[in-house]
Image (spheres, helix red, strand yellow):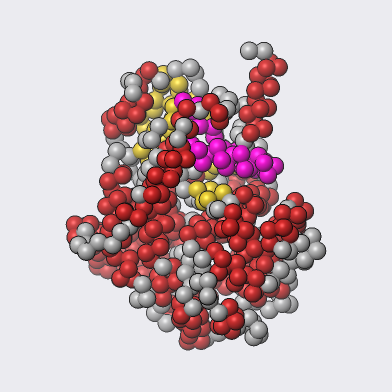
Amino acid sequence: MTTDAATSDREDDTRYGAFSDAGPWQIDPARLRWREGVDALRAASQKSVPALVRARRIPPVGRFTEAAVLIGGALAGWWLGERRRGGEISRTGLSRRLRHAFERLGPAYIKLGQIVSSGRGIFPDELVREFKTLRDQVRPEPFAAVRRVVEEDLGRPIDAFFSHFDERCLAAASIAQVHAARLVTGEDVVVKVQRPAVGRLVRRDIAAMAFIAPHLVGRLPIAALANPPQLVELFAETVVEELDFRLEAQNMLDIAHVLRDAGQTIIVVPRPHPELVTRRVLVMERLNGFQYEDIEGMRAAGIDIATMLRSMLISFLEGAMIYGVFHGDLHGGNLFVMPDGRVALFDYGMTGRMNEMQRRAFLRLMVTGAVNDIRGQLEAFRDLGALPPDADLDVVMRLLKVHEPVKDPTRMSAGELVREIQDVLKGLLAQGAKLPKHLMLYVKDMLFFDGAIAQLTPDLDMFGEIAKIYAYFAQNHAERIQRDAGIDPARAALDLDGVKRSMGLDADVASLTHRDLQRRRREIEKKLADRSVLPTGLRGPGD
């Protein structure tokens, strides 16, 4: 192949998707055989969900017993041990014991731990620190099991495809583990291999969740708001797609294409192999870089961390608001920061997809929030399914006290704060409020961004960043936003006073760093802990 021809192919490839500049192979979606019938596979996986989450008369006693023994044993060990020493030792001991229990319980609990690990500044630091290992350091399967899966799915001995296959895994999580390898044609790759028994374990956990979830409705205020049966359905919908790597490979192509169409350059999607993709094996381009927590390494490379995070957040919001497709499982184990400042993003098994009606509602939710149109926000919440179609929005607005002077929760007494929370939750539940699946995935990813900012750029001015993000969308998507949301962002100014009010701040607060935000959270957490709202083992410093 001549240099000109290679350059032409590369331009075609990167013109389609947000791939690396010079990949080990070229992507032509029309020629990928593993894509045949992928839409039918996705539809079939979703069609299987109702049977998985159906109500069961007989509880899965064995699974309940196993969970009770492991989690109960963790709590008992902490109670007899670290609890007596109090403070950080107590919190660290409980967090470590819970992490071990979650890892032994399998995929569902590991995924819950991954969510917690992205919530730095929201969950206790000790819990976040321990649960970070569940992102990619779960006990791996023995290599004999990995070899068996690869050979069964590819249909030939492993050395027919790979000149080298590292028996030590690079990372291992709930559904799969990844290994470095080299193809017989010379390309360095990463091979994602599904755990042999994961399908059975996931279905067992879904059965246990589906049995207990209806019994939680209305019993715990926060659980009621989140709608436990719907949480189980969401978990089932996402995890059944994660069990077929052909769907993940298609997600990679879709998000790469959306990013390229939007003109985003911050995210790089690894290319899936044109042929070596099956239900349980996914061979992809190998990309390298800094761990996203390696602040010193990134700064030494001249990477502007604040700009990187802002660009990532914009690309995430753009995918959801403008295209209706976004990566639904952001956490530190799923990305590298490349030396040129771009972010290599992996693990597309959990991908948020909204139909056109849902996307428009989500877009209206974000834009009306930015311009402080409270009623518009509530209407968007309703259209997303967070409120029933017949919800009385005037009642909800009175419940949220939008027309009353702002109350700073850090200046409220513990009793006032608890009553305020209880009154709002009770009122929202009375109106039929719930948290729909698209918002749950959005919140999950925002937990990652919140933790990343807290760790990487804690002194970033939050108001300034919000203004820059709003300006981006006003400049690049004004026509689309006006057509779909009925608001022209080029003319409707960002209402920072409304943003401050939503945080319980007075309008005269000039700036707010994430460090300030964390300090406020700790004050609120302490007030709630003083009223015995938090478990004693996980209360903050000075309890």
Above-or-below relation of 114 to 250: below
What quarter of the picture does the N terminus occupy? top right
Please report the residue visible at 72 percent of the width from the left and 54 percent of the height from the top. Answer: 480
The percent position of residue 27, horizontal first and vertical second, equals: 57, 28
For the question of whether residue 129 can be seen, the reply is no
What quarter of the picture does the C terminus occupy? bottom left
Q: How many marks?
A: 0
In the shown orientation, is residue 41 left or right of residue 375?
Answer: left
Locate residue 91: give its quadrant. bottom left
Locate residue 486: give its quadrant. bottom right
In the shown orientation, is residue 27 left or right of residue 178?
Answer: right
Residue 197 on the magenta span: no
Magenta stretch bounds: 247-275
Locate residue 7: give its quadrant. top right
Please report the residue visible at 59 percent of the width from the left and 72 percent of the height from the top. Answer: 378
For the question of whether residue 476 can be seen, the reply is yes
The percent position of residue 263, horizontal first and vertical second, equals: 70, 42
Report the front residue among 315 and 87. Answer: 315
The percent position of residue 145, horizontal first and vertical second, equals: 28, 33
Residue 272 on the magenta span: yes
In the shown orientation, is residue 431 left or right of residue 407?
Answer: left
Residue furthest top as drawn: 1
In the shown orientation, is residue 460 left or right of residue 415?
Answer: right
Please report the residue visible at 38 percent of the width from the left and 17 percent of the height from the top. Answer: 160
Above-or-below relation of 166 to 298: above
Report the front residue among 531 and 7. Answer: 7
The percent position of residue 512, horizontal first and vertical second, equals: 67, 68
Please report the residue visible at 53 percent of the width from the left and 55 percent of the height from the top. Answer: 445
